[in-house]
Image: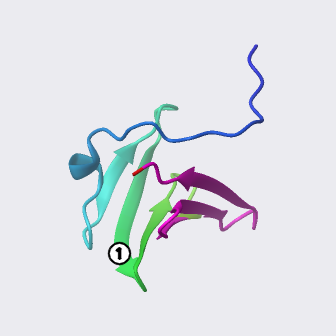
Amino acid sequence: MAEINGKYQLERNENLDAYFKAIEEYEESMPSGETLKNMTTIEDGKIVTVSQVPDGSKTTRTYSFSEDGMLLTLVHEKSGETAKRHFKRLQ
């Protein structure tokens, strides 16, 4: 099994237009088969997506952009856990 820990760099995006619908509730199907109800807004220059999972808890994804790249911050409301993914800008 490959090691999960390490440095990652986003290589490409696909279907972002279909995925991202600002200021409108939409559903997102997860690989696990669950369906999330999402609301995405733009706040202070950041893209913020609040997702409600079937058990009623919420997860927030905040996309912050800089000249160097993007920071994705994930917060799980119920557990209080926070995770961050750092992306390097290539161009």
> Residue 37's x, y, as percent?
39, 57
Residue at x-position 25% and y-position 69%: 24
> Residue 6's x, y, as percent?
75, 36
Quadrant in the picture for the N terminus: top right
Of the residues shown, which amino acid type is indicated by label 1?
A: Thr
Query: How are the residues colored?
Result: rainbow
Left or right: where does residue 80 sit relative to residue 36?
A: right
Q: Is residue 1 above or below residue 45?
A: above
Mark 1 secondary-structure assignment = strand
Left or right: where does residue 2 sit relative to residue 91?
A: right
**Residue 11: quadrant of the picture:** top left
> Residue 86's x, y, as percent?
61, 55
Q: Which residue is mark 1?
A: 41
Question: Which residue is most to the front?
Answer: 91
> Residue 41's x, y, as percent?
35, 75
Q: Nearer the viewer, residue 40 or 9?
A: 9
Q: Is residue 17 above or below residue 50?
A: above
Q: Report the predominant secondary structure element of the magenta stretch.
A: strand
Residue at x-position 75% and y-position 62%: 81
Q: Nearer the viewer, residue 80 or 69?
A: 69
Q: Nearer the viewer, residue 5 or 59?
A: 5
Left or right: where does residue 9 sit relative to residue 51?
A: right
Residue at x-position 28% and y-position 48%: 16
Question: Dot 1 surroundings within 10 Å: few (below 14), some, or many (20 or more)?
Answer: some
Residue 13 painted magenta: no
Question: Which residue is most to the top?
Answer: 1
Left or right: where does residue 24 sit relative to residue 88?
A: left
Question: Which residue is most to the bottom?
Answer: 44
Segment colored magenta: 61-90
Q: How many marks?
A: 1
